[in-house]
Image: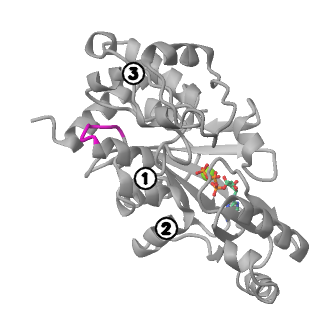
Amino acid sequence: MSIRSAAAIARAFASGGNGEKYRLLPFYIRKDGLWRSPEESAPVLDRGTPDPVDDVNGGGDRALRWQFPAAAAQVDVWFPIVHGPNGEDGALQGLLQLANVPFVGGGVLGSAVGMDKLAMKMAFAAAGLPQVAYRAVTRDQVWSNPCVFPKLCEDIEAELGYPCFVKPANLGSSVGIAKVRSRDELEKALDSAASYDRRIIVEAGVIAREVECAVLGNDRPEASVVGEITFKSDFYDYETKYTDGAADLFIPAQLPDAIAEQVRQRAIDAFLAVDCAGLGRVDFFYVEATGEVLINEINTLPGFTATSMYPQLWEASGVPFTQLVDRLIQLALERHGATP
Ligand SMILES: Nc1ncnc2c1ncn2[C@@H]1O[C@H](COP(=O)(O)OP(=O)(O)OP(=O)(O)O)[C@@H](O)[C@H]1O
Ligand SMILES: [Mg+2]
C-alpha cells in the first residue's frame, strides 16, 4: 500500500507544472530498516512490490541501518509515505525532525497520537468530540492473571454489550480487529489483540454509515467535501479495504447539509485536537437513526493512490492530485519556517 501511494505521488510530481518545479529522489526503506538509494529505489516504485527481506529482525545488515544513502543530503523537503507503524506514528517524523529538515505531514506528537487509538480517543474526548463508548484493556490484564480475566470480560459485557469491537491500539488497516457477539468470541478476540499490541481498545458497536472528510493545512486547516464508503462485508475489514471492488466510494456523500457541515467542522476540530499538520483524513460514524455524528479516527497518513479517498475528496473539492502534492510541499516548508 505504501509503495502504491508513493508511486501515485511520484507520478503527480512529474505531471502538470510540478515537473519543472520539483526533482524527485525516491528512498525505499526496507522492512528491516535498511535505506535504499534513489537508483535502487526507483525499480521498487516501478514494480510496485517490496524487496524481499530474509530476516526482518536479523543482525546481518545491522551496521548498515546506521547509514543513509549519500543522496539524502540533497533533499530539500521530505515526503514520508510509509503507512502504519514506524512511518505514520512519529518514528520516521522524529528522525527527520532530528535532522532539522522540512517534511510533509504531522510531526512527532500528531503522528503518535493519531496512531494510538487510545491516546487519540482521549484527545478527542478532551476536545468534546462525540464518539462511541469504549474502554482500555492492557495485554497484562488479558494474559497475566487468570483471576482478573473473567471479571474483565464481565465488565466489558456490562459496560459495552454486544456486538463490540476489539482492536489492538496501534496497527491500522483493520489488522487484528474483531467484531464480537458472545463471551467466547470476546475471550478469543482479546487474546488475539494482545498478541499484536500491549494496548487494546474495546468499543461498543454502532449501526452507522461510514463517512470521511479530508483535511489540508497547518494551523488553519480546511475540510473537503464529505465522502462515504459502502461495502457488503460485515465491517470494513482488511480484505474489504484491499480487494478491488469490495467497497464503493461515494463523493460527495448523500447527506443532509447540516450533517455534512457538522462532519467538516468536527474533522477540523479533530485535526487540531491531535496536533496534526499538512494532511489528515478523519473518519466518522453517522448514525442515521439518531442523527448522531460520532468520530471514529484520524489517519495522519491516509491512503494516497489515485483511487484513494483522501485525494479523491480533494479532487471533488477543486484541488486536483497534482496541485494537492504541491500544496503539501508548500505546507511542509511553511511549517518548517523555510518560506518567508
Ligand atoms: N465501534 C464500531 N462500531 C461499528 N463498526 C465499527 C466500530 N469500530 C470499527 N468498526 C468497523 O471496523 C472498521 C475498521 O475499524 P477502525 O477504523 O477503527 O480501524 P482501522 O481501519 O484498522 O484503522 P486505520 O483506518 O487506522 O487503518 C471500521 O471502518 C468499521 O467498518
Ligand atoms: Mg479505519
The answer to which of 250 and 46 lies nearer the viewer is 46
In terms of secondary structure, what is the magenta stretch mainly? loop
- Quadrant for residue 207, please give it: bottom right
The residue carrying mark 2 has its beta carbon less than 8 Å from ligand 1: no
SS at badge 2: helix
Residue 31 place in picture, x, y as percent: 59, 36
Q: Residue furthest right?
A: 184
Q: Measured along the vertical axis of the image, is residue 183 above or below residue 147?
A: above
For the residue carrying disc 1, how many other residues have a C-alpha within 10 Å: few (<14), some (14-19), or many (20+)? many
- What's drawn in magenta, residue-wise? 99-104
For marks 1 and 2 on the same chain, the one whose residue lies earlier in the sequence: 1
Residue 51 place in picture, x, y as percent: 63, 24
Give the CA distance from mark 3 to mark 1.
24 Å
The residue labelled by disc 3 is 322
Q: Amino acid at mark 1?
A: Ser
Q: Which label lies toward us, 3 or 2?
A: 2
Residue 155 visible in this rendered orientation of the protein: yes
SS at badge 3: helix
Tag of residue 111: 1
The residue labelled by disc 2 is 119
Side (left or right) of 337 relative to 66: left
Residue drawn at (56%, 63%) of the image:
117
